[in-house]
């Protein structure tokens, strides 16, 4: 049967939510048995951790693609897992965050790149980091098919509600998980 490609954004209600772990795990589950595969994207500009988690060290990264210095296909790395690929951010060794910013995801180039990725993969799973500390989740939510909002144990109800409202404003559906 024909499948409509899906883009799932994973965002945290707080900066300490395990969005990278959830995104990589979800992408790995999606990748089992698919013909076109799954791409997991590290858009967590505040705390990029996918490179370390997947044990990859690519020459090119997502920031290069968003700055127009590389094509997405040149920056994608393929994992040992069947049908799973990644497009990662490189953390700055001095400050830990990426050189990419939320503004990097606003322009026409970012929209074009996402459309190309959606055409090439069955699923695109995006780690957007924390809703409360980065605008990336709010920017990308409108372009996603749905959002998984990761809540850490013990998070205050008002913080969780605020994060959910920020995603709801984009018009995408939200699945809460703790």
Image: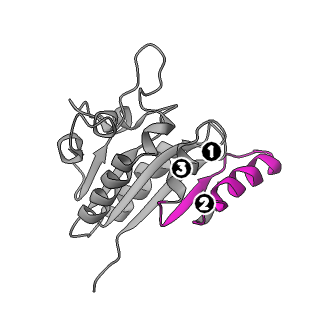
Q: Sequence order check: which comes first, mark 1 or mark 3?
A: 1
User: Can residue 71 be found in the magenta stretch?
Assistant: no
- Mark 1 element type: loop
Q: Which residue is mark 3?
A: 139
Q: Which residue is mark 1?
A: 131
Q: At 32% across and 38% down in the image, what residue appears?
A: 62
In the rendered view, does 69 fall on the left or right side of 149? left
Q: Dividing the image into 4 quarters, which one contains the C terminus? A: bottom right
Along the line of sight, the residue nearer the viewer: 163 or 105? 105
Tell me how many marks there are.
3
Magenta range is: 143-172
Mark 2 or 1: the one toward you: 2
Q: Are marks 3 and 2 in contact (CB under 8 Å)?
A: no
What numbered label is drawn on residue 84? none
In the rendered view, does 59 fall on the left or right side of 51? left
Tell me where residue 42 appears, x and y as whole percent.
40, 42
Q: At 66% across and 62% down in the image, what residue appears?
A: 168
Q: Sequence order check: which comes first, mark 2 or mark 1?
A: 1
Q: CA distance from mark 3 to mark 2?
A: 8 Å
Q: Dividing the image into 4 quarters, which one contains the N terminus? A: bottom left
Tell me where residue 158 appears, x and y as whole percent.
82, 49
In the rendered view, does 73 fall on the left or right side of 19? left
Q: Is residue 79 visible?
A: no
Q: Which residue is mark 2?
A: 170
């Amino acid at each position: 049967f024909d499948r409509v490609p899906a883009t799932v954004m994973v965002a945290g209600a707080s900066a300490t939510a395990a969005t990278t772990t959830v995104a990589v795990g979800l992408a790995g589950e999606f990748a089992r048995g698919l013909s076109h595969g799954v791409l997991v994207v590290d858009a967590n500009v505040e705390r990029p951790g996918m490179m370390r988690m997947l044990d990859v060290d690519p020459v090119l990264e997502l920031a290069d693609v968003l700055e127009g210095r590389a094509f997405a296909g040149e920056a994608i790395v393929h994992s040992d897992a069947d049908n799973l690929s990644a497009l990662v951010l490189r953390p700055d060794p001095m400050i830990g965050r990426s050189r990419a910013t939320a503004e990097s995801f606003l322009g026409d180039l970012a929209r074009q790149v996402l459309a190309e990725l959606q055409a090439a993969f069955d699923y695109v799973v995006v780690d957007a980091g924390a809703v409360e500390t980065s605008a990336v989740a709010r920017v990308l939510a409108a372009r996603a098919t749905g959002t998984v909002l990761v809540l850490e144990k013990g998070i205050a109800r008002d913080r969780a509600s605020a994060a959910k409202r920020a995603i709801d404003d984009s018009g995408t559906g939200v699945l809460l998980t703790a």
